[in-house]
């Protein structure tokens, strides 16, 4: 491979990853219009987001392992097809039942795409090229979520909330065609599949996400117990869907926890801030999306510099600095007087948060697949993305259960970030 050119794999994987992350955050700025269009109650409306999150997070471990066994290309094409068809059906939905069920199906497609994209990058690139590709992949995680707010708000205000989902269809078709023609198939392995373990992992993760989303402690406990049974089974059998040796590496294990804490912080931030902007400053859905532009632009600029920064200072140092900068930005909002104006209380902190986010996502993604054997890159990517998906509902449910004051909500995010700083400092150490 030409050392200076990434070829087709990187743009295909980044666009696919961008689409699934964008759809995860579109709901935040278009939820009011969806509720009015389909006459959804607040409880029903919450399920438009929860159905996607449940299946996305619940099937990630299984999807990551399947890509290791049956080949990246084949599994990736299946994921793209599910995502494209469900996106079309969401856009055409005429009832709450159809919308929510298709969002659940879309989450399954996303659960396949997320770990497979990172695994495809791991397979296609080595050394400095891989580090650069993962930097762009990590940046996409932040940019996709932020731009989703903007695109969701813009399409909702200018056209319809349906446009935010139907727009996925032509992009998905293009990705399927490019994948079929240009991406090489990886080796298909004749390995046993741990079907019981797969079921336990899905039930456990869905239970945890559902329990935290609905603030139901009993279901959370049942989900944790089911995952404990899953871990015990994986320890006892010789063909595990989740090889526990992944957690023997201190860097990877620390990165999983740091990724969890990052999303415990950022998903509530993406959730609460648009609400505050609309209630405090009378912003429209589109204006709320535009308010995230400083964060998104700075994040993108930082992403372009990350390969140089990590090469010069090391992955761990960049990650630690990013966590500290994120803490600074969140603290500024927590201490601000939001009754003044967006420019006076949110704009500058948003830039600082964008810098922190930009410095965190690529290094924590890279650490999550640190020294992973090629044959396990799919499941390692699946674990990384699982932490990303379950972190948000956990953080959001904890904050919602404890306060409904905006400043206190931000202070809770500050606490999560402080814990993450200690995790990174003591566990995610460079070799």
Image (cartoon, grey):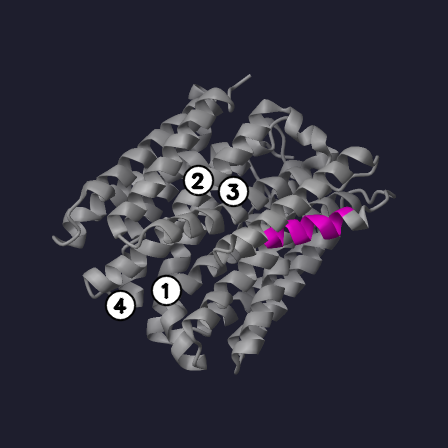
Which label was assigned to residue 284? 4
- Residue 21 at x, y percent in the picture: 49, 54
State which tag comes first along the sequence, 4 or 1.
1
- Discs 3, 4 touching: Cβ within 8 Å: no
Residue at (16% x, 50% y) in the render: 343
Residue at (58% x, 45% y) in the render: 386
- Discs 2, 4 touching: Cβ within 8 Å: no
Residue 33 is a magenta residue: no
State which tag comes first along the sequence, 2 or 4.
2
- Discs 1, 2 touching: Cβ within 8 Å: no
Label 2 SS? helix
The residue wearing badge 1 is 29
Placement of the C terminus among the 4 image quadrants: top right
Q: Distance between the residues labelled 3 and 2?
A: 16 Å
The residue mark sitting in front, 1 or 3, is 1
Which label was assigned to residue 262? 2
The residue wearing badge 3 is 137
From the viewer's side, name the closer residue of 95 and 90: 95
State which tag comes first along the sequence, 3 or 4.
3
Q: Distance between the residues labelled 1 and 2?
A: 21 Å
Q: What span is in magenta?
A: 197-207
Q: How far apart are marks 2 and 4 (CA)?
A: 28 Å
The answer to whether residue 118 is above or below residue 48 is above
């Amino acid at each position: 491979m030409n050392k200076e050119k990434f070829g087709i794999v990187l743009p295909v994987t980044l666009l696919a990853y961008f689409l699934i992350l964008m759809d995860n955050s579109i709901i935040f700025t278009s939820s009011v219009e969806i509720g009015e269009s389909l006459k959804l109650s607040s409880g029903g409306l919450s399920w438009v987001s929860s159905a996607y999150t449940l299946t996305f997070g619940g099937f990630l471990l299984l999807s990551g392992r399947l890509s290791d066994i049956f080949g990246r290309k084949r599994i990736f094409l299946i994921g793209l097809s599910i995502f494209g068809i469900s996106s079309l059906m969401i856009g055409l939905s005429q009832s709450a039942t159809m919308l929510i069920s298709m969002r659940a199906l879309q989450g399954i497609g996303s659960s396949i795409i997320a770990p497979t994209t990172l695994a495809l990058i791991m397979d296609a690139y080595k050394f400095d090229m891989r580090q650069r590709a993962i930097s762009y992949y990590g940046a996409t995680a932040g940019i996709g979520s932020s731009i989703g707010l903007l695109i969701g708000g813009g399409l909702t205000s200018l056209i319809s909330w349906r446009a935010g989902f139907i727009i996925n269809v032509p992009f998905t078709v293009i990705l399927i065609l490019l994948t079929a023609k240009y991406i090489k198939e990886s080796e298909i392995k004749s390995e046993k599949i741990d079907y019981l373990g797969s079921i336990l992992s899905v039930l456990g993760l869905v239970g945890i996400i559902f329990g935290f989303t609905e603030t139901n402690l009993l279901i959370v406990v049942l989900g944790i117990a089911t995952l404990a049974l899953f871990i015990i089974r994986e320890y006892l059998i010789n063909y595990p869907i989740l090889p526990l040796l992944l957690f023997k590496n201190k860097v990877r294990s620390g990165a999983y926890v740091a990724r969890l804490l990052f999303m415990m912080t950022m998903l509530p931030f993406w959730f609460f801030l648009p609400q505050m902007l609309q209630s405090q400053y009378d912003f429209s859905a589109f204006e709320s999306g535009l308010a995230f532009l400083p964060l998104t632009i700075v994040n993108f600029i930082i992403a372009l510099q990350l390969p140089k920064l990590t090469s010069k200072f090391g992955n761990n140092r960049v990650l630690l600095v990013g966590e500290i900068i994120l803490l600074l930005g969140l603290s500024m909002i927590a201490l601000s007087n939001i009754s003044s104006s967006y420019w006076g209380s949110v704009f500058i902190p948003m830039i600082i948060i964008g810098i922190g986010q930009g410095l965190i996502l690529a290094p924590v993604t890279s650490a999550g697949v640190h020294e992973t054997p090629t044959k396990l890159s799919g499941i390692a990517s699946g674990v990384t993305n699982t932490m990303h998906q379950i972190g948000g509902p956990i953080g959001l449910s904890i904050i919602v259960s404890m306060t409904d004051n905006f400043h206190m909500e931000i202070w809770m995010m500050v606490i999560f970030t402080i814990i993450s700083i200690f995790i990174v400092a003591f566990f995610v150490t460079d070799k």
